[in-house]
Image (cartoon, rainbow, N blue to C red):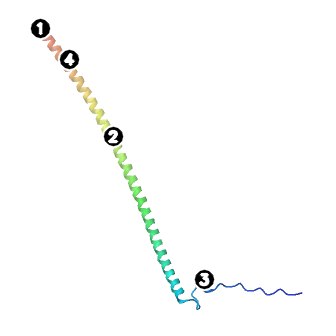
Amino acid sequence: LTTPPAPTPPSRPSARGLGFGMADEDPTEKFSLELETKQLGELQESRDELLSRVSHLKRDLQDWRFKLDTQVKSYRSELGDLRKTLNNEVTSLRDEFADLRNTLKQQLEATAEMAAEEAEEE
């Protein structure tokens, strides 16, 4: 019987291919990698800042909408009350005018009767 050959260890990619700062790495590549890392960090920070601002703006918009809805409901209620009051006032004025019309009619009729009686007496 023969023994199978010993397994070979998995090959490791070179440090240069992974972008790790190993001793055999070119200094310009290292500088380029550091610059890219720094820029990536700045971009991430900027992204986080923008997301935070958007979140605050969304919250502000929701607060504004809630306040606006509350004001609209309040104004609608107030307008409804004013409309009811106005309708009551208009109804009251109509009733008063109807009473005045009847009173004037009665006075005209009474005056016409008195004039007719005076004309008969003469």
Q: Position of residue 104 (x, y in %)?
A: 20, 23
Which residue is depicted at the point 61% across and 83% down? 17
Say which label, 1 or 4, has the lower sequence index: 4
What's the distance in space between the residues labelled 4 and 2, CA to CA?
38 Å
Residue under numbered circle 1: 121
What's the distance in space between the residues labelled 2 and 1, CA to CA?
56 Å
Which residue is depicted at the point 75% across and 86% down? 8
Q: Tell me the kind of residue under disc 4.
A: Glu
Q: Tell me the kind of residue under disc 1.
A: Glu
Secondary structure state at the residue bearing disc 1: helix
Residue under numbered circle 4: 109
Residue 106, compared with residue 29, is above or below; it is above
Q: Position of residue 120 (x, y in %)?
A: 13, 8
Mark 2: give few (<14), some (14-19) or many (20+) Cα within 10 Å.
few
Q: Tell me the kind of residue under disc 2.
A: Arg
Which residue is depicted at the point 23% across and 24% down? 101
